[in-house]
Image (spheres, grey):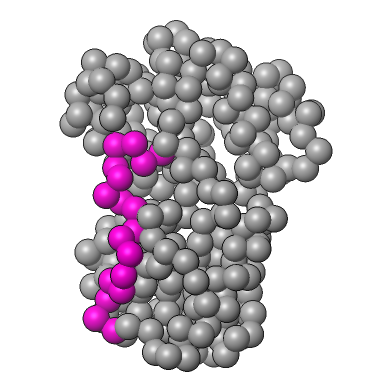
Amino acid sequence: MPDPEETIGLIAGGGQFPLLVADAARKHGTRVVAVAHQGETDSALSEKVDEIAWIKLGQLGQLIKTFKKFDVTKALMAGSIAKKKMFEMRPDLKGLAIMSKLAIFHDDDILRSVTAEFAKEGIEIVSSTLFLPDLLAPEGCLTKRAPTKNEWKDIRFGWKIAKELGRLDIGQSVVVRKKTVLALEAIDGTDATILRGGALAKEKAVVVKVSKPKQDLRFDVPCVGMETIAVMKRVKGAVLAVEAGHTLIFDRSEMVAAADKEKIAVVAVKSC
């Protein structure tokens, strides 16, 4: 945890995570300087931080300029950026310089290159869970209903597939049933993957979402929440399995209650 008198930079994407980070940091007494993305970040963030600048995706030079203006030496990334927006990106010169060096536009390649560029400017990228470690999934079954013996077979099967998918830096979740792969996450995201796989399963789909084999907790940490359960309800899904200690769970109590209502088993495991 940083010194309360320090300033933390917040690179904000969409969703509630940036808002939660801002609240937790300021509760700790830390000054928050946010750089938010137009069309992605919730405008409510403006009321939760000390300073904020709005940029378009890819304006890395403007992002760094903002942090240096407010003497930010440590920053974290929180929130999602719709992967489809990559095709709409209009990088500035600094962003273009990084993109031109990449052979493949994988998430980790981009983020590590951006992190290295920040380091050159004297800005350290720290863990996204720095102020909110309790959001990480605890090991064990979180719901009243535990997976059945056959569902555990699907979890173990899906785990291996999901880990390989993560190793290739393509996605983090798979949908399986009866040891058959029904859907793999790609650029469309987890919810769309559940809908695709669930439609093929008809019912009782098992969703497995894991971290990448060498997950960097500074960015791209898997996350689930109320929306995940809502999507599973639509396809009559049966199990949600996530990786303990490497998955963010938002609104945990509400999510578990919603899962219990639908008799969806939610389990967090260390490994399979």
- Tell me if 1 is positioned left or right of 200 in this view: left
Image position, residue 112 (x, y; %):
62, 34
Of 140 and 178, nearer the camera is 140
Q: Is residue 244 above or below residue 34?
A: below
Of 3 and 68, nearer the camera is 3
Q: Is residue 55 above or below residue 161?
A: above
Q: Where the N terminus falls, by quadrant?
A: top left
Q: Is residue 265 above or below residue 226?
A: below
Task: Name the quadrant containing residue 133.
Answer: top left
The range drawn in magenta is 128-145
Is residue 48 located in the magenta-colored stretch of the structure?
Answer: no
Is residue 137 located in the magenta-colored stretch of the structure?
Answer: yes
- Tell me if 88 is positioned left or right of 249 in this view: right
Q: Is residue 94 visible?
A: yes
Determine the main secondary structure of the stretch shown in magenta.
loop
Image position, residue 84 (x, y; %):
64, 50
Task: Name the quadrant containing residue 258.
Answer: bottom left
Residue farthest to the front, as pictured = 271
Q: Residue at x 32, y 83 (%)?
A: 146
Image position, residue 201 (x, y; %):
57, 87
- Tell me if 140 is positioned left or right of 175 in this view: left
Q: Residue at x 63, y 42 (%)?
A: 108
Q: Residue at x 41, y 29 (%)?
A: 10
Task: Name the quadrant containing residue 141.
Answer: bottom left
Q: Is residue 205 visible?
A: no
